[in-house]
Amino acid sequence: MRISNSECVSFLEKLGPFDYAITINLKKRHPIYKIYINQEIANKTAEWFYKALSKKTLGRKYRYKHANLNCIYSVEIGSLEKRHHIHMAISKPSNITSDDFLDKLNVVHQKMDWRHGDIHLTSYHSSNWIKYLMKEGFEKVGFL
């Protein structure tokens, strides 16, 4: 049985609430290791970003599995002229301010090996972002 796009969007909406919509561009080639990016590396990079941000914002609560950030992501694979990039919808923990969260988000982004350029960040307004995550050409949507 195949799931329709609308059923998938309604399922992903229930994983929220989300506060921020994020796009992270990735390098095509690692400058030190001289390897080209692929789907596996892009997925691992998205998971690393989520885990590092969770550890930075939640601390011991995350480490001992008592708390998590709500997050869904998709990796868009670019062609030769486009870059791979990660689209992410993520929640802010209630125990810190928005400014604090954004500072921590930028610190974690700066530590990424595969990042290219600045992080693109907007407020999450509606399920349109989830529909954008699932636009034509996406492989899969992950939720952490």
Image (cartoon, rainbow, N blue to C red):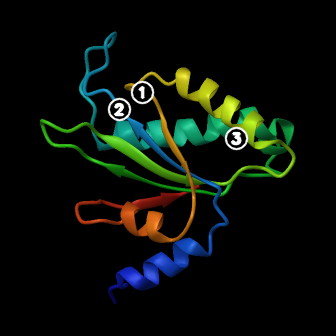
Mark nearer the N terminus (2 vs 3): 2
Q: Looking at the picture, tell me which residue is in the foreground, 116 or 67.
A: 116
Image quadrant containing the N terminus: bottom left
Q: Which residue lies most toward the left here?
A: 80
Residue 92 rendering spot, x and y as whole percentages: 72, 50
Which image quadrant is residue 40 in?
top left
Look at mark 1 in the image and give the residue it sits on. Answer: 115
Name the residue: 31% across, 27% down: 27
Mark nearer the N terminus (1 vs 2): 2
Look at mark 3 in the image and give the residue it sits on. Answer: 54
The reply to whether dot 2 and dot 3 touch (C-beta < 8 Å) is no
Residue 17 rendering spot, x and y as whole percentages: 67, 66
Q: Residues within 10 Å of mark 3 (few under 14, many from 20)?
A: many
Which image quadrant is residue 8 in?
bottom left
**Secondary element type, mark 1:** loop
| Mark linked to residue 26 | 2
